[in-house]
Amino acid sequence: MNKSPVPEGLTPAQLIDFRIKELDDWRGALLAEIRSLIKVADPHVTEDWKWNIPVWNHDGLICTGETYKEHVKITFAKGAKIPDPKGVFNASLDGNARRAIDLYEGDKVPKVAFKALINEALKLNQTKTVKKK
């Protein structure tokens, strides 16, 4: 997608707001829904803006939200280590670390299963943090 240059001097949350508004279609609405689900699953999540995309962290990277012309991709940095009993991950399945969810126009986010993935990613990050201490 041809993204507008992001304004300077904005907080990460404001940059994510900008991206959602800039999309002005189903992708923006879907990214806003994903963002909301992440915040419900982890009220202490922090938002960041890296690689020109939204990033959600808590004791380490949880996931990123990329938007393309045909889909929205939510990539879990350590997804290969996260249990996915509902089979939500449908992309980047061959790698040793990441797993992703590609969502297309009209797709519904499996809310309960998605929030479970966020919780599992958070548990994994917290386990890593405890072991480092």
Image: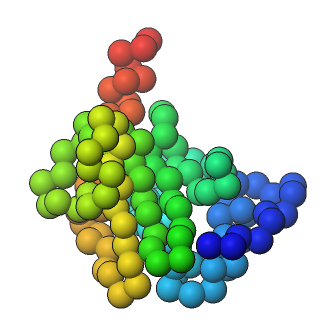
Asked if residue 81 is positioned above or below residue 55 in the image, the reply reads above
Q: How is the image coloured?
A: rainbow
Residue 19 falls in image quadrant: bottom right
Q: Locate residue 115 relative to residue 16 in the image: left or right.
A: left
Q: Residue furthest left?
A: 85
**x 12%, y 54%: residue:** 85
Q: How many marks?
A: 0
The quadrant holding residue 38 is bottom left
**Image position of 110 (left or right of 32):** left
- Between residue 66 and residue 9, name the one nearer to us: 66
In the image, 1 versus 128, the foreground residue is 1
Can I make out residue 36 in this image? no
Residue at 65% in and 64% down: 16
User: Which quarter shows the N terminus?
Assistant: bottom right
Q: Quadrant of the C terminus?
A: top left
Rendered residue at 72%/62% (across/down): 15
Give residue 62's position: percent from left, percent from top: 44, 45
From this view, report whether residue 50 is shown above or below residue 71: above
Instruction: Specify whether residue 14 is in view.
Output: yes
Whole-percent x and y of residue 13? 67, 59
Q: Residue at x 65, y 47 (%)?
A: 50
The x and y percentages for residue 81 are 25, 37
- Relative to 64, is 29 above or below? below
Residue 80 vs residue 45, the one in the foreground = 80
- Residue 128 locus on image (x, y percent): 37, 24
